[in-house]
């Protein structure tokens, strides 16, 4: 057996004990941690060694990592930990973990350099005071070796089981056959390209229409790549819950062939959906499933992994059987699963779990991004932060006395920025240095207050939320660049009986490419696939994929004669023409329905436009059944909307383009026979979007296309794609706007359409 494990992962497995404790404790940021380590190193004498790479073995287990520092004169190995506040408040299990890491590094150093003894020191560096607290143990090489062996022995049996699981998995995957007698049209081409991307360690963008089996066509080749030892595990990332279900079902189809498939497939769900005690806090003094979590984790982990399929229900069953938290058990299982299915944020967010694990461990991962056209907007939201002045005013009223001065300082700088504005919306080249400094000072003060007197803030949810917003905002300010804009929006509100100028500061991401690029670099391969990924250079540029990424445009199984596409070129849905467009739209829908009664979807650009069309339909064509999407529909209401599309049903359901019913909806056969799209889907032309256009123009030279045209037509094609879902479907799509006659618009429509 040859199993490689990082020092930190080894110690977290073998040395963690006690309660799960998620009470917020102020911790240094990653940048502060790096700076703290550099400060400690700079204070040391000449000859001090930093970042020492160390490796050791025990019973086929290879342990590796980097020790923070070693002073050869003092013969002292140092493990540096940055912190804030009183060290006495640090949980005991954290300290135990730190000592475990230091002792393992101590053994590895003694072994590498032939040392007979060594001082092992924990250096706790307080970010706020810049003071060091040193805790030192003296060890012989023999005592450190004994500790190392003990840690490895606790892990070795597990590692041996993991190695056996991996061998059995790879053997089974090598023998795995495609579950159907033949690939669908285009599916084999997709599968071959995905396999080659994993083999060659490259990225791939694949546009493949509905009906070819994209989910199975991407998962199957990557499982075969696991069998060939080209990748270790697969992350299947989705934008929405239905995508997770499709992935789990596809893998279940593979499982049902012959002998049981030894494949661990984990579904990650949001914390609010997995929490068993939402009224309790995540620590042992409050939640029974957090109390003694790490003491019972090993048994819960083993029981869960024995089942293989680790969906939400299975993980919950295993967790509750061992009295541990289902959500945090799933987080632990992510370390030991072959396939992880979850939301985009688990790999692409700034604090993403799967990305952190990939960096920490020697994993070769394949990342599958389902419906990848959604990633642009999702990533923009991940790397955008707003800061509301109203929240600052509330914070000033409720904050403890120790925070009054830094809050007042921030308020003064904020008001000074407001006074420079003569318009309600203004874009600034950068965040003013004085405002940025005031925000940083406030965060430092609040962090120290939380460390020294947590009771003065912990119970104040509004103040805590302001603190988190401030940290997120400041973090993005520190990473500000040409990929984002800083804007200020002014409003006038009534506050304390008088008119008060309020503003919202926003670091607004436009091009997420710089934030996402490290994620591609960390993965062995990334495959982005969707039915609408054209033009591919738009997504490659904005999402930051490598220039050499592969591109595949799969011909689907659909034939032009299945879909009649008509353009209503005498209608304009531009804002200035909305009133004149209502009657032509209503009458066109009624005429199509009269010619071929059945179920149709009508897509409009806004709820206001939708309501006007629906009202006119009911007035001019009362015999035609209509129903409409409403703002803020819950899951039950959405299900009721779709339930009206029955095989024998007739009528028109109206929805907003780009909303819940524009994609991810399968109404096969007679359940849907046509769609009306009365818009180009272009984003609203406003101050924010115009600034985004200028940013895109400066970067790519095609500001209008990148901001308006490409995103708009992607929504149109997605919505039209609801009509033809299988090779047996037939239907009609009406594109209602004169701009659909333009060549630059036509070229963005699917190649197989014959537009009349």
Image (spheres, grey):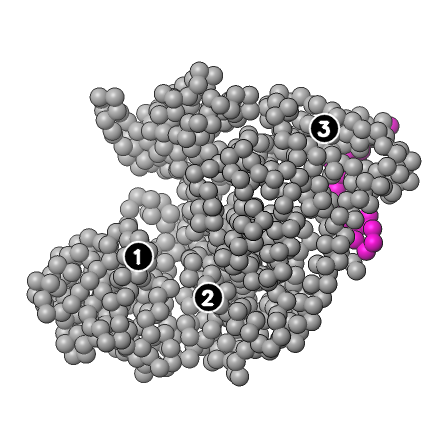
* SS majority, magenta: strand
Seen in the picture, residue 736 relative to 329 is either above or below; the reply is below
In magenta stretch: residue 68 = yes
What residue is disc 3 on? 123
**Circle nearer the N terminus (3, 1):** 3
- Residue 384, by quadrant, is top left
Seen in the picture, residue 191 relative to 477 is either above or below; the reply is below
Secondary structure at badge 3 equals strand
- Residue 105, by quadrant, is top right
* Side of 691 where 431 appears, left or right: right
Give the CA distance from mark 3 to mark 1: 55 Å
What residue is disc 2 on? 246
Q: Residue at 55% across / 30% down in the picture?
A: 26
Q: Position of residue 574 (x, y in %)?
A: 21, 57
**Circle nearer the N terminus (2, 3):** 3
Neighbor class of circle 3 (other Cα within 10 Å; few <14, some 14-19, many 20+) is many
Q: Specify start and end residues of the magenta stretch as a single range.
A: 56-73
- Residue sitting nearer the eye, 643 or 560: 643
Seen in the picture, residue 168 relative to 388 is either above or below; the reply is below
Give the CA distance from mark 2 to mark 1: 20 Å
Give the CA distance from mark 2 to mark 3: 49 Å
Q: Position of residue 326 (x, y in %)?
A: 53, 49
């Amino acid at each position: 057996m040859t199993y490689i494990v990082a020092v930190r992962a080894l110690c977290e497995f073998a040395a963690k004990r006690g309660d799960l404790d998620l009470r917020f404790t102020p911790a240094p940021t990653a940048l502060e941690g790096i700076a703290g380590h550099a400060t400690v190193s700079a204070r040391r004498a000449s000859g001090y060694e930093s970042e020492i790479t160390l490796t050791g073995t025990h019973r086929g287990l290879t342990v590796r990592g980097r020790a923070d520092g070693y002073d050869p004169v003092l013969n002292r190995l140092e493990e540096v930990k940055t912190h804030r506040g009183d060290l006495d408040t640090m949980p005991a299990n954290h300290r135990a973990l730190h000592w475990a890491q230091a002792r393992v590094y101590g053994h590895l150093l003694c072994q590498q350099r032939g040392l007979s003894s060594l001082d092992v020191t924990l250096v706790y560096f307080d970010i706020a005071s810049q003071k060091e607290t040193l805790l030192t143990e003296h060890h012989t090489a023999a005592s450190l070796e004994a500790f190392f062996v003990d840690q490895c022995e606790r892990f070795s049996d597990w590692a041996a089981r993991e190695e056996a699981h991996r061998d059995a998995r790879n053997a089974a995957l090598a023998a795995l056959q495609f579950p159907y007698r033949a690939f669908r049209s285009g599916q084999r081409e997709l599968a071959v390209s995905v396999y080659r991307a994993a083999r060659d360690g490259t990225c791939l963008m694949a546009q493949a229409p509905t009906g070819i089996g994209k989910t199975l066509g991407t998962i199957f080749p990557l499982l075969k790549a696991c069998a060939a030892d080209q990748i270790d595990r697969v992350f299947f990332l989705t934008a929405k819950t239905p995508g997770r279900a499709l992935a789990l079902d596809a893998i279940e189809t593979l499982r049902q062939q012959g002998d049981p498939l030894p494949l661990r497939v984990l579904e990650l769900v949001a914390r609010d959906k997995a929490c068993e005690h939402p009224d309790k806090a995540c620590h042992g003094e409050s939640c029974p499933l957090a109390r003694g979590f790490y003491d019972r984790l090993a048994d819960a982990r083993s029981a869960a992994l024995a089942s293989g399929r680790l969906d939400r229900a299975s993980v919950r069953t295993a967790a509750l059987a061992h009295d541990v938290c289902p959500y945090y058990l799933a987080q632990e299982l992510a370390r030991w699963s072959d396939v992880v299915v979850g939301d985009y944020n688990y790999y692409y967010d700034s604090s993403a779990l799967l990305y952190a694990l990939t960096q920490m461990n020697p994993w070769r991962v394949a990342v599958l991004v389902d419906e990848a056209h959604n990633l642009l907007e999702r990533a923009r939201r991940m790397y955008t932060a707003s800061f509301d002045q109203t929240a600052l005013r509330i914070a000033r009223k409720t904050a403890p006395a120790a925070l009054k001065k830094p809050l007042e300082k921030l308020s003064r700088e904020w008001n000074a920025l407001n006074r420079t504005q003569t318009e309600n919306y203004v874009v600034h080249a950068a965040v003013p240095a004085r405002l940025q400094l005031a925000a940083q000072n406030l965060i430092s003060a609040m962090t120290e207050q939380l460390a020294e007197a947590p009771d003065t803030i912990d119970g104040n949810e509004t103040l805590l939320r302001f603190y988190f917003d401030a940290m997120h905002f400041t973090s993005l300010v520190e990473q500000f660049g040409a990929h984002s804009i800083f804007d200020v929006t002014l409003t006038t509100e009534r506050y304390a009986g008088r008119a008060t100028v309020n503003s919202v500061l926003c670091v607004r991401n436009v091009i997420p490419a710089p934030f996402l690029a490290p994620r591609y670099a960390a993965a062995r391969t990334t495959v982005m696939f969707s039915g609408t990924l054209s033009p591919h250079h738009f997504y490659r540029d904005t999402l930051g994929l490598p220039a050499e990424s592969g591109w595949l445009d799969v011909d689907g199984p659909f034939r032009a004669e299945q879909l009649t596409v008509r353009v209503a070129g005498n209608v304009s849905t531009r804002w200035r023409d909305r009133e004149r467009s209502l009657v032509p739209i209503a009458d066109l829908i009624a005429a199509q329905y009269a010619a071929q009664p059945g179920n149709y979807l009508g897509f409009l650009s806004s709820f206001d436009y939708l309501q006007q069309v629906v009202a006119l339909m009911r007035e001019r064509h009362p015999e035609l059944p209509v129903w409409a999407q409403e703002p803020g529909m819950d899951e039950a209401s959405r299900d009721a909307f779709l339930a009206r599309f029955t095989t024998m049903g007739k009528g028109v359901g109206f929805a907003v383009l780009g909303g819940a019913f524009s994609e991810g909806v399968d109404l096969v056969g007679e359940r849907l026979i046509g769609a009306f799209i009365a818009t180009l889907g272009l984003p609203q032309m406003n101050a924010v979007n115009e600034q985004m256009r200028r940013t895109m123009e400066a970067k790519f030279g095609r500001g209008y296309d990148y901001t308006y045209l490409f995103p708009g037509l992607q929504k149109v094609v997605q919505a039209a794609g609801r009509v033809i879902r299988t090779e047996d479907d037939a239907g009609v799509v009406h594109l209602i706007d004169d701009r659909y006659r333009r060549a630059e618009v036509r070229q963005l429509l699917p190649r197989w359409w014959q537009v009349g």
